[in-house]
Amino acid sequence: MDKRIYRGPKGVTVILDPKEIVPNDPGQGTPAMVNYRGMSATYTCAVNAGEVEYQGRTVELPQDVIEWLDELQEFVDKFYDDFYAQIENKNNRYSPRKPVAARRGGTRQKQGVKRDD
């Protein structure tokens, strides 16, 4: 999964970076960031508070930027859904070390032993 960048009105960008997701500790990392005029906020903070900041300086986002961020919500949700689906798929893959019969749910027949079917 690659980093995704969305560009909106008045130079605002939203960066969705899967490398920032920490599955075992969802509060860590900053996978969805909003950048505006050299300032930033997490996507959730920007949408909820309507502002970004840098070194203690806070700037309120214009209404059209806030509306664009609201419209982007489905893409942010899909980003997280895709990431966790990818992890789930990786966890459900068959190990290459398992015998083919075991991967298919069968049993491995020992050489020279005849099965009674």
Image (tube, rainbow, N blue to C red):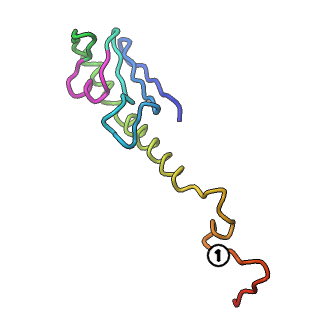
**Can you tell which quarter of the image residue 28 is in?**
top left
Q: Is residue 74 above or below residue 37?
A: below
Query: Dot 1: what SS?
Result: loop
Residue lying at 22% horizontally and 11% vertically, measured from the top left:
56
Residue ID at (70%, 90%): 116
Q: Nearer the viewer, residue 47 or 17?
A: 17
Counting the numbered discs, the total is 1
Q: In the depicted view, which residue is nearer to us: 109 or 39?
A: 109
The residue beneath circle 1 is 107
Asked if residue 81 is positioned above or below residue 93 in the image, the reply reads above
Q: Residue pushed farthest right?
A: 112
Question: Where in the figure is residue 98, as x and y percent of width and height?
Answer: 65, 62
Q: Residue 74: which quarter of the image?
A: top left
* Residue 41 at x, y percent in the picture: 30, 21
Q: Horizontal and vertical percent for residue 57?
A: 22, 9
Residue sitting farthest toward the bottom: 116
* Percent coordinates x, y for residue 60 in the rendering: 21, 14
Q: Is residue 39 left or right of residue 20?
A: left
Magenta stretch: give its range. 40-51
Q: Residues within 10 Å of mark 1 (few under 14, many from 20)?
A: few
The answer to whether residue 52 is above or below residue 89 is above
| Residue displayed at 34% across by 40% down | 25
Quarter of the image where the C terminus is located: bottom right
Identity, as a three-letter code, of the amino acid under mark 1: Thr
Q: Give the side of residue 49 with respect to residue 99, left or right.
A: left
Looking at the picture, does residue 68 appear above or below residue 97? above
Q: Is residue 75 magenta?
A: no
**At x 28% / y 25%, what residue is drawn?**
67
